[in-house]
Image: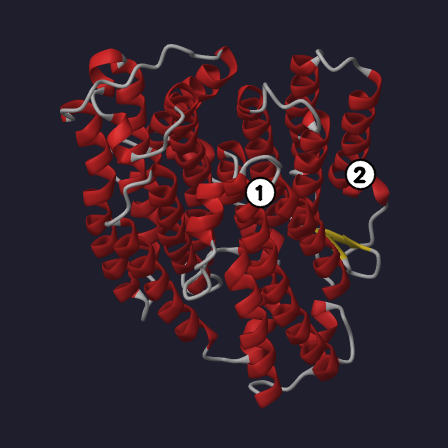
Amino acid sequence: MPAIDLTTSMVDLYLAVLAVVVLLCDLIFPRDWRKEKVLITAAGLLLGLVPVALLWSQEPATAFSDAYRLDILALFFKAIVLVGGALVAVLSYDHFRNLVQGFGEYFFLLVIVVLGCSLLASAGDLIVVWVAFEMISLSSYVLAGYLRFSRRSNEAGLKYFLYGAASSAVMLYGFSWLYGLGQSTNLSEIARSISTGSPGGVVALALILVGLGYKIAMAPFQSWVPDVYEGAPTPVTAFLSVVPKAAGFAFLLRFLGPLGDYLAPMWPAALAVLATITMFAGNLMALSQTNVKRMLAYSSVAHAGYLLIGVVIYGQGDRVFNLQALLYYFVAYLIMNIGAFAVALLVERNTGRELISDYSGLARTDLGLALTMTVFLVSLIGIPPTAGFMGKLLLFGAALNTPPWGWLAIVGILNAAISVYYYMNLAREMFFGKGAPVRVAARPGPVMAVIAVLAVAVVAVGLFPSYFYPAANLMRSLWGG
């Protein structure tokens, strides 16, 4: 790959400048200029898509002695985290409307997490990976506990920090093993230096997967998810469920691509087992939940399992189709998951409660909102004509066409069937609940705009999947063929 200058890494440079601008705006603008600060953050993140688009057709390249990589895979995940961050920034305005202090700093931390995720998507060196992970982790701990006078938020931040610190230590220990084996921190250099299937490589891979498993909510390292998702502010929960997870998967793909077979040739089988455990753990635990945020938390664990199917078949069989199916599912997951949390945020704002029973009779007082939430739930299940259906169809179809992983598709279909119960339980409560009907009197314009856009998108992406496929030059970008 040819060396590049700093202009090719302009997405991350732009985000660094945006973070400074957001912080300065909080110092310069009066405290009552809250809408303006939200607009600057959200619009600034969306403007980051411009350099992504400009770089999309560029040849794959590296910088800083291969520590930074730019290819279609990196640009795709940069786009995902930019859009996810912008949507959550808009949702955050109304939720933090009564925050006396720290309103501007919240959006600064949001941009810092997006910057860390963007950097991780391009990381080709263990040092860059570690810096990016710490940017994401430290800022995320603060965001989870951002409501200082809320006991639940403080508890969420503390639990997130304790689990995160432990997992980071384990992953760093795995990095040290990897450095010892390859005598380098560069992933490509390590791949050229280590022997295939050495015991040390197996240990390194296992330790790194433990740390990554925490980051992407993979079972059995997902125990922090329900408590943190329930206690954190709802916009932060929506953010954590998509943006850092996307970055974690980006690194997992980039890490296993050059190194997986060298460290442990049987890594796909091990990851397939973990994917199966993750799907069942998420869906079965979600069945008994009475809190909407906890239910969606376990749902996000199950979806991490679905996404792991794409990682297992990554680089095998029809490599272009398999990778396109995985990346398409990320687009669908972003839309439907943030959409569901946006509706939950609106109900919470009006009722102050988060239980499934609190959605009772929503269809009688606000049919449009109940139908919109149902669309998101149907997509999360994987029912046509939604993005979730097409995502599962492509992902499971890719697994069926990639021997010997067809059984993963069967496991995925079975788990999608299990999820019908808890998703439709919420829909049943909205349309047929016997309790006092919930009334959504306060309908902030920004929140309603996000919900409307995502509701349209979840159907449009499902009906016209070809427009949202990553470009066919993925093969050229990743494998040079």
Q: Position of residue 383 (x, y in %)?
A: 23, 37
Residue type beneath disc 2? Leu
Closer to the camera in the image, 406 or 353 = 353
**Residue at the spot of label 2:** 13
Q: Residues within 10 Å of mark 2 (few under 14, many from 20)?
A: some
Residue type beneath disc 1? Ala
Closer to the camera in the image, 461 or 369 = 369
Residue 144 is marked as 1
Residue 479 is marked as none
Q: Where is residue 187, by image quadrant?
A: bottom right
Separation of disc 2 and disc 1 at Cα?
26 Å
> Which residue shows up at 62% across the image and 37% down it?
146
Q: Secondary structure at mark 2?
A: helix
Query: Left or right: 145 with respect to 297?
Result: right
Query: Left or right: 405 with respect to 219?
Result: left
Q: Where is residue 309, by image quadrant?
A: bottom left
> Which residue shows up at 78% across the image and 60% down it?
66
Q: Position of residue 2 (x, y in %)?
A: 79, 55
Query: Left or right: 266 with respect to 383?
Result: right
